[in-house]
Amino acid sequence: MMCSNEKPKENHGATLCRDVDLFYQTLFEYNPDMVFFLDWEGIIAKANNITLENLKYTAEELVLQPVENFVPSYEIDKYKDALRQALSGSLANIDTAFVRSDGEILNIYLSMMPALNDGRVVGVFAIAQDVTEQRKIEKEYLETELKFRSIVEQALFGFFIIQDEKIIYTNAYFRELMAIDEPLDDKNLWELLHDDNKSKLKSMIDRLVAGREAMTQYLQLHDADGNKIDVEVHAMRLIYQNEWTIIGTVHDVTEQKRTEALNEFITYHDYLTGLPNRRAFDKKLEAELDERKDSNQQVAILYLDLDRFKYINDSLGHVLGDAFIKQVSIRIQQSLKAHQYIARMNAGDEFAILLLTPGDEQEAVEQSKQILKALQKPFVIDRYQLTITTSIGISIFPTDAEDAETMMMHAHTALHDAKESGKNTFRFYSSAMHPAAYDTLVLENDLRNAINLDQLELFFQPKVNSDRNEIVGVEALIRWNHPERGLLLPGVFIPLAEETGLITEIEKWVEFTACKQNKAWQDAGLRAIPISVNLTADRILGSDMVQNIRQVLKETKLNPSYLEIEFTESTLLKSEHGVIAILDELRSLGVRISLDDFGTGYSSLSYLNRFRGRIDTLKLDRSFISELSFADEAESNFITKVIIELAQHLKMSVVAEGVETEEQLQVLKDYNCETIQGFLYSKPIPAEDFAVLLEKGK
C-alpha cells in the first residue's frame, strides 16, 4: 500500500506515512538485488544503484528507457506478457535475461508486482535477481550428470558404488570382467578377492570412510571361473543419496602387469642365457654390501672371462657361438652351490658370480676350482667338439674394497693378472699385482666413457696425386685425447676396444664424424674430395652396418661418392661370400670401396680377380713401400710393380701409403702409381689444419 498525496489530518498519521515511505525507500535503495519502478508504459522511472552497477549503465542511460531495450530479442515477448500480468494487478515471476552495456547476457529471475495508489495500478515494482552463476552451475551439473551417466553405462572400465561395505551398483563392464550375470552384494564382494587382498581392500574402505578423499590400490580378483585378474582400483568418498558412499573404477591391468613383468625381466636379464645381466648384478651387489656394511660379513666376487672365446666365435659364427655360450653358462651354474648369484656381464664371454653364504676366501677358492673343473669336459656344438677354459679374478669385501665400484674394478684387475699368468686359473686381488694389468683396466674404464665425454677426435692425412701435386682424397684416422695421458694413437686403444666389444660404437662414431666433417668442408666452399674410413672385419660384417651407413649419409647430407670404406685383407678370411654381399650393397649406395694393407700375407693376387668390379682402390701396405729403392735387384720393387700393374689392369686405382722419402716417391711414379699417402706430403693433422691445406690445393 502507498501513502496518498492527501495531507493527513493528524500528526500521528503523517509520521506513520513518513515511516512507511522511509521503509520502502530503504528496501528500494539497499536491496541486494536489482530493483526498479516502471510506469504504466513499462518505462523505467527509477532504479537502485545495484541495477546500475550490475547492468553497467549510468542513471542517464537507464532511466526513462523502456525495459525491453535491455532485454534480448528472444525474451521480449515473455517479458511483455509478464508486464501485462503485473499491470493487471497480479504478481508475475519469470526466468529471463538482461543485456549489460558490454553486451554480456545476465540470467535473471524477475519478479514484477503491481504498484497501487488508492487501489489503482499506477506502475510496476520489479525485483531482478542475477542468477547467472547459479544457472551456470545448474547447467554444468546437469551436463556432468548426463555425461557421467552416459560414460558409466557405456564405459570400457568397471564402475561400482559401495555403501556400508555393500555393493549397490556395478556397471555392465564390471560384471563382464568378473564373468558374472547376477547383481553383486556385500557377500560376494569379499569372495571376489584373494585372501591376501582382502585386508588391502578393507584398509582402503576404512581409510576412505575415516576421511581420506581418494585412493588408488592394486588388487588381484578372481572371476567366477577362478581366473586371476590384476586390477587397478581408483576409489573416492562422497555423499550420495544422503549417505557416505564410496564410488570407484576398476581397470583390468592383467596384460599390463604381464608386460611390466616381461620388461622387468628384459631389463635385468641377459636375452641369450636368461641369467641376470650387468645391471641386475650391480643392483644386487650394492644391496648386499649395504646390508653387510655394519656387520663386516664377507662377500666375494668371481669375475670370469672365457679364454680365446673370440676365436671360436669368429671361426664358427655367431649362431654356434651363442649356442656355445648357453651351454657354458649352464655348466657354470651347475658347478655353483645354492644361494650363489651369477650374471652374464656383457654380450660376450664375461660372467660374474657373487658368493654370499659364505663369501670368504676359502669359499672363493673352492668355487673357482669347481668352475675350472666343470669346463674341462668338452662341449658338443652341432658337429663340433669344443673345449674352453676360463680365467677368474677374485675380490673380497671388505678386505679388498668397501664399495661396489672398487670391488668390481679390483676383480677385473685380478682377472687380467690371471690372463697374464697363462689363463685357465684364478687370482685374488692384491695391491702388489703387475701394474700393467691395473693400467689396462683403468684404460678400459676410461675408454668406455671417451665418446660421451667427447674425447675422441679425427685427424686427417691427405692422398696426393704426385703428378699434379694435388690433394685427391683424405683418410680419417682416430685419436684419443685422454685427459691424463695426452693424445693416444689408435694402436694403444683400438686392440682394447676390439677385445672389450667397444669397437662397434667407436667405428659408428668415426663413420658419422668423418662424413659430417667432409660435408662441412664442402659447405665452406672447399674442393670436394672423397674421405676414407677404416672399418674392422666385425664392423664390415655387422648386420646393421649398411643401414647405418645409409642413415649417416642421410643425416649428414653427404653425397655417397665422397665416402670410401676401407677394409683389410683379413676381413676376406672371415666370410668371403658375406663380404661380397656387403660390398655389393655399399656400392649400390654409391659408396667407394678400398682394400687396405694389401700384400700382408693373408691373401693372394687371385683375390683381386675375384673381387673385380667390387673394389675401387687398392692400398699397398707400407711394408712394401719402406723397402723401395732404385736398386734393380730389390725384391720389393718387383713385387710392388706386379701388384700395381695387376690392379690397374683390373681397373683399380692404387694408393701407396707410408711414403716418406723422395726415392720411394720416384720409384712409385716410375711404376705409374700416382696417388701417394705418407709423411713425405703430410702427417695426419687436425681438421682445421687440413682445411687450410685443402684450400691451398696441395
Image: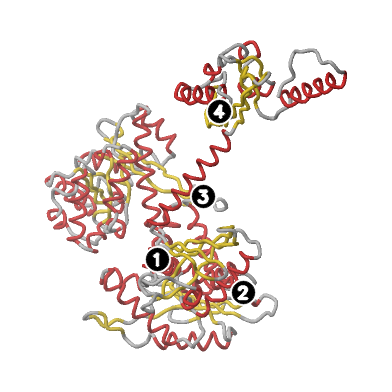
Q: Nearer the viewer, mark 2 or mark 1?
A: 1
Q: Nearer the viewer, mark 1 or mark 4?
A: 4
Disc 1 element: helix
- The 10 Å Cα crowd at callout 2, few under 14, some 14 to 19, many 20 or more, is some
Quarter holding residue 516: top left
Compare marks 3 and 4 and give the one earlier in the sequence.
4
Image coords of residue 632 (percent x, y): 21, 48
CB of mark 3 within 8 Å of CB of mark 4?
A: no
Compare marks 3 and 2 and give the one earlier in the sequence.
2
Looking at the image, what colour scheme do you see?
A: secondary structure
Q: For mark 4, what is the residue? A: 106
Q: Nearer the viewer, mark 3 or mark 4?
A: 4
Q: For mark 2, what is the residue? A: 289
- The 10 Å Cα crowd at callout 1, few under 14, some 14 to 19, many 20 or more, is few
For image coordinates 32% across by 71% down, the residue present is 311
Quarter holding residue 174: bottom left
Q: For mark 1, what is the residue? A: 259
For image coordinates 49% across by 24% down, the residue present is 81
For image coordinates 65% across by 62% down, the residue present is 211
**Amino acid on which the number 2 mark rests in the picture:** Leu
**Amino acid on which the number 3 mark rests in the picture:** Leu
The residue lying furthest to the front in this view is: 9
**Amino acid on which the number 4 mark rests in the picture:** Leu
Q: CA distance from mark 3 to mark 2?
A: 30 Å
Where 389 falls versus 106 (above or below)?
below
Where 256 falls versus 358 (above or below)?
above
- The 10 Å Cα crowd at callout 4, few under 14, some 14 to 19, many 20 or more, is many
CB of mark 3 within 8 Å of CB of mark 1?
A: no
**Amino acid on which the number 1 mark rests in the picture:** Thr
